[in-house]
Amino acid sequence: MSPHTPMTPNAPTHSQIALIGAGPSGLAGARALSKHGIAFQGFEAHTDLGGLWNIGNERSTVYESAHLISSKRTTEFKEFPMPDGTADYPSHRELLAYFKAYAEHFDLKRHYRFGVRVVKVEPVSDAPDTLWRVTLDVGGGQQETHEYKGVVIANGILAEPNMPQWPGQFNGQLLHTSAYKKAEQFKGQRVLIVGAGNSGCDIAVDAVHHAQSVDISVRRGYYFVPKYVFGLPADTVGGKTKLPRWLKQKVDSTLLKWFTGDPVRFGFPKPDYKIYESHPIVNSLILHHIGHGDVKVRPDVARLDGHTVHFKDGSHAEYDLVMTATGYKLHYPFIDDALLNWQGMSPQLYLNIFAPRFDRLAVLGMVEAAGLGWEGRAEQAEVMALYFKGLDAGQTNALAFSKARQGPSPDLSGGYRYLKVERMACYVNKDVYRDTMRQTAAELA
């Protein structure tokens, strides 16, 4: 069967949900829809599944050395655990194999058309229960358009580079981490990494072994979490006792200093926010290399001039390659922003899932939280599928939820004051979010 052939040719599209994406969130959506008997058609622009974890996918932003920053047991799908023998922090290769096994176990691939890109999604009318017109690029210069009962968008949130703009011109290589694949790219180069998020720190550590020199430019302070504590993955230690937020922040920030030292001593600015108000950096190797003089910490970039980078403290240095580890933007290019209730840096969706104006327009995976894992995405998908199933059956609980969906979302922050930056635009508190997902699913069931 050709990758462009619909897997359910006899089912009319207007009785199906269109599901966009076959990465972790898309597969979670496919699992939930199929489990609850909801007809759907999946679309994936790449020729195989895995999303960003498939390094062969041209939209993938993983690199050869990429591994999970959360451990396997806090990240895996609960109903399909990772096999015994999987590394504590699996590589992208192990993860792709895991997603392929997940899809095979639940027979999900047959629902997808691979190598088919969604180019436009638009409502047929303004009615809340409108059909959705979906235009597809099926390759070879051909397009198709079909009308679907609803649309679930799960095309990922880590694919569209957020590239900073600085005054001046740089005459060396200026790249975003999305263009980074192998450490050999740094061979013999004077390298500046801009941004000390998880990818920035990973890549700086990679560069040490190949580059002539490595500097890392930072705007703000960070909290660094080791991957192992007492020989165990850090995210599996403790957590049984729920502390009040203020006490947890105080205790954990003190413990971190015991395990990793004070990052200010290594040249980082003192954080102007409390721990957990931004995504923590799960990498203590960067501190190891800074302590050994392999990496030098620099302030924020002020301007570029040829091969010279000027920093905001008045210092400057020469580089051959500047790589910006400045994150990604939420990007749904095939649908009008207004349909997703886009405000500021992100869509404002009920529970980070549902568009307020429409019954059957949902986004999966537009959520970030330390330790949320793929089970958190599976719980999103379960809520979505139960809601759609209840709508189809005219259940009163689904109709009540539909009314709530049109109003403001409940507070999912857990009282944390998250940084107002693009990286944190869809951030939630893991415990509050997962509790809300489970409670909502129970109400809809």
Image: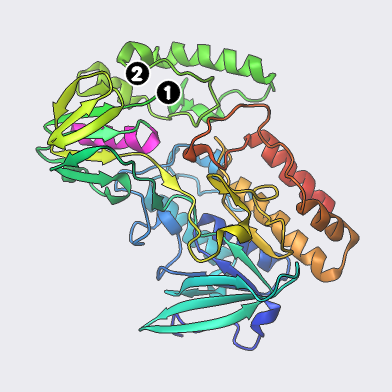
Residue 140 horizontal/vertical position (percent): 35, 84
Query: Residue pushed farthest bottom?
Result: 10
- At label 2, counting other C-alpha atoms closer than 10 Å, the crowd grade (few under 14, some 14-19, many 20 or more) is many
Query: Residue pushed farthest front?
Result: 167
Dot 1 lies on which element?
Answer: loop
Q: First in sequence: mark 1 or mark 2?
A: 1
Q: Quadrant of residue 41?
A: bottom right
Residue type for callout 1:
Tyr
Q: Which residues are magenta?
A: 197-209
Is residue 204 on the magenta stretch?
yes
According to the picture, the residue beneath numbered tag 2 turns out to be 268
According to the picture, the residue beneath numbered tag 1 turns out to be 222
Which secondary structure dominates the residues rendered in magenta? helix
Q: Residue at x 53, y 45 (%)?
A: 345
Q: Is 32 in front, or is 19?
A: 19
Q: Residue at x 74, y 45 (%)?
A: 408
